Image (tube, grey):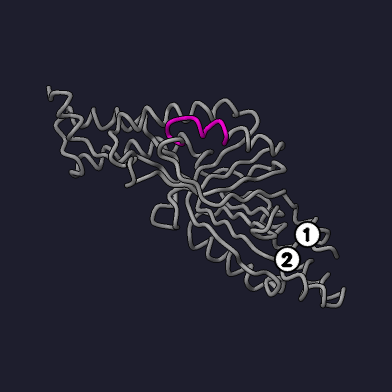
Amino acid sequence: MIPETLVETAQPAVPLTIEGASVLHQMMRFRWPAWRALPSKDRSALASEAARKLEDWEQPSDGRQSALYSVLGHKGDLLLVHFRRNFEELNEAQLTLTRLGLSDYLEPTASYLSVVELGLYEPTAKVYADLTSKGLAPYSEEWNREIESVLARHRQAMAPRLWPEIPSAKYICFYPMDRRRGESVNWYRESMADRKRLMHEHGLVGRRYAGEVRQIITGSIGFDDWEWGVDLFAEDYLVFKRLIYEMRFDEVSAVYGLFGTFYVGVRTPAAALANLLAI
C-alpha cells in the first residue's frame, strides 16, 4: 500500500475535463448611417437573405445551432452565438456570415472562441488515487488507457450537456473569466484537494438557481485571451445580478476570480430581424 501522502504528491495536478460543442461568440456593431442611406427595397432584400440563413441555423441539429441577440449598451448592437461540432464548422459559419450582403453593414467589435467543457474534479481525485494505488505511473501507456476509458464513460453519460441546445430563454449574459495566477494568490498552486473543495462550494451557489437560469461553461485556454467563457440564459434578467452577486462571496470568486467584459442581450428570432433593423 502506497502511503496517502505519496499518493497525493505522485498524482497529476491537472483535473480531468471532457469537451463537446465548439462555440463562437461574435459581437457586432451595426453601421446605421450607411444602412439608412440604402433604398428601402435594398434593405429589405439584404435583411431577408440574412434572416433565411439565420432561420436555418436557429433549428438545433446534432450539436449545430446559432442564435441572435440584440445587445444592450455601447459594446455592440448584435451578438451571434454559434454551437458547432468542431472548429471547421465554426469557421464555415463565420465565412457564411461574411458572404452575406448584410455583413457590409456589420463591424466586429469582439469575439470569443471556446469549447463546451465539463470539469471532473470529483471523479478525478478518485481515479488518480485508484490508479496510483495500483502502482501505475502517471502518463504511462496503461495510465493513459485507463484515463481514456474513464473519460469515454463520462462523455457518453454527459452527452446532453456536452452538446446542448441553445436555451430559448429571452435573455443572455455572457462574460469571460480567469483564475488568479501570480499576484498574492495563485489558483494553479493550490492542491487538487483544495481546488476540489472550493469548486464544490462554488457549484452549490449555482445549483440554487437551477430553476431560474441555465448556465453553459466553455473552456478557452489556448483558444482565446481568457480561460473560460460563461453563458447564462434566463427569462428574468435580474437573476443574472442576483446569481453573480451571490457568487462574489464564495471563496473561488472572492479570492481567485477575475472577470472580463459582460454582454447582455435580448433574444431576437430570425423572423424579427427586419423589425430589429427598422425596415
Q: In which quarter of the image is residue 8?
A: top left
Q: Quadrant of residue 270?
A: bottom right
> Which residue is depicted at the point 40% across and 39% down?
256
Q: Does the magenta portion include 271?
A: no
| Nearest the eye: 71 or 122 | 71
**Residue 251 belongs to magenta span:** yes
Identify the image quadrant of the N terminus: top left
As shown in the figure, which amino acid type bears the numbered disc 2?
A: Ala
The residue under label 2 is: 50
Residue at 71 percent of width and 74 percent of height: 101
Split into 4 quadrants, where in the image is the C terminus?
A: bottom right
Residue 156, disc = none
The relative height of residue 169 versus residue 26 in the rendered view (above or below) is: above
| Mark 1: secondary structure | helix
Reading the chain from its start, which is encountered first: label 2 or label 1? 2
Name the kind of residue labelled 1 in the image.
Answer: Leu
Residue 69 against residue 135 in the figure, above or below: below
Rendering coords of residue 245 (x, y %) = 57, 34
Marker disc for residue 273: 1
Determine whether, in the image, residue 5 is placed left or right of residue 259.
left
Q: Where is residue 233 in the image (x, y as percent from the top left)?
A: 64, 41
Residue under the image location 53 percent in, 61 percent down:
89
Give the dominant element type of the magenta stretch: helix, strand or loop: helix
Q: Tell me if 146 is positioned left or right of 69 in this view.
A: left
Q: Which residue lies furthest to the front in this view?
A: 184
The boundaries of the magenta stretch are 244-253
**Crowding at mark 2 (Cα within 10 Å: few <14, some 14-19, many 20+):** some
> Is there a contact, CB below 8 Å, between mark 2 and mark 1?
yes
Visible in this render: residue 75? yes
